[in-house]
Image: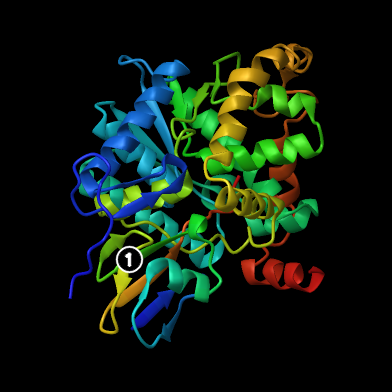
Amino acid sequence: MVAVGSKCRVCKGPAIIDLPRHNAHFCADHFLELCRRQVAKAIEKYDMIHPDDKVLVAVSGGKDSLAVWDLLIDLGYKADGLYIGLGIGEYSEVSGQYARAFAAERGLRLIEVSLRDDYGYDIPTASRATRRVPCSACGTSKRHLFDKAALDGGYTVLVTGHNLDDEAAVLFGNTLRWDVEYLSRQLPVLPARSGFPKKVKPLVRLTEREMAAWCIVRGIDYLVDECPMAAGNKHLAYKATLNAIEQESPGSKASFYLNFLDNMAPLLAGRSASATDALGTCTSCGAPTTSDLCAFCRTAAKARAHEPVPVELVLSKGRRRR
Amino acid sequence: MKVLLRNPRREVDIDGRRSVNSLLAELDLPRESHLVIRNGTLVPGDAELSADDVVEIRPVISGGC
């Protein structure tokens, strides 16, 4: 028996998704149209990508990065992908399979970098060697390798799949600490400067629920399982808090982040200039840094000097801590 | 109905008909952080689920930053 359900706001056909923040339901076609429109609006409003840009998309095998790559191709941009093998056990093996399958099925170019094979370490080992949380070693490694791959490959724009929930959660954390330095840099576009490519986040107007729905409707297979090393991190706690607010007051996440960009970010513009002006060059790799060795080279050196640590060992220690 | 849950992957049997929103509330899963797929198709919160449906409740939150 087919139940009489809600109707699409646009065509009145059967709806497949409800979006409380828009106070509306949508059918598959009009939901996809909404997503395309939101991405196109972000690209235009924040001057993210021009038709002649050479675009590189950082791809993890998860929903957001595959969705943003798919959306850019769908909107007519030419974009290659970059996958970094982080060495997080089976999780990394499977995530790589999803990224490769997505690229192969669409005839897209995927560049691959392996932390273990190319740099002699992996994230579990780096976490143990630096005595820092895994997400810290992971972020440091990925940011450096994203920048390097973009610059080495002559790409003019580096795209990441950060969505509205990601940005709202980071904004929430930065606001709780009133970290003006980080707040002043939390923009959907970071312009190119010496040693850094232009970085853009075309999904900032779309939630991760919408991005998962995009993948399901478009038939994109992605890694649903969560990174085992991210469990219990602050970012997830901030997201849960914001989603609890969103449930009570739909649209709160969007107004929190997008109104920050419109109303607060202009007031903070230039506040991080002192830090960027003071950047020197890493004596090992030549990347911009505030000290002799950049954070990536310091992390890599410590991790390479450490015996390889299986991901299970780091996880079991983390669980004991909690 | 058979309901597949993720992270960790597990399956539960639920008796009787109910709406998507009722099922999520019963399982204490926030609507904003989950999607529901019935027999391979995405369905909104007010969709009715029958006893013979195969249902997947997919979490949408990623922890990376």
Residue sitting at 31 percent across and 61 percent down?
B43
**Can residue A282 be seen at all in this image of the molecule?**
no
Q: What residue lies at 70% left-to-right and 40% top-to-bottom?
A: A172
Compared across the picture, whether A63 is left or right of A31 comes to right
Callout 1 crowding tier (Cα within 10 Å): few <14, some 14–19, many ≥20 = many
In the foreground, B17 or B24:
B17
Tell me if residue A132 comes above or below residue A314 in the rendering: above
Q: Residue at x 59, y 53 (%)?
A: B63
Say whether residue A221 is visible.
yes
Question: Is the N terminus of chain A in the top left, top right, bottom left or bottom right quadrant?
Answer: bottom left
Where does residue B8 sit, x and y in percent of width and height? 52, 74
Of the 4 image quadrants, the one containing the C terminus of chain A is: bottom right
Given the image, on which type of amino acid does mark 1 rest? Ile
Q: Position of residue A78 (x, y in %)?
A: 28, 27
Return the residue at label 1: B37
Of A33 and A125, nearer the camera is: A33
Q: How many circles with numbers are drawn on the protein?
A: 1
Please provide percent x and percent y for residue A228: 59, 64
User: Where is A222 relative to A163, above or below?
Assistant: below
In the image, what residue occupies the spot 38% across and 61% down?
B45
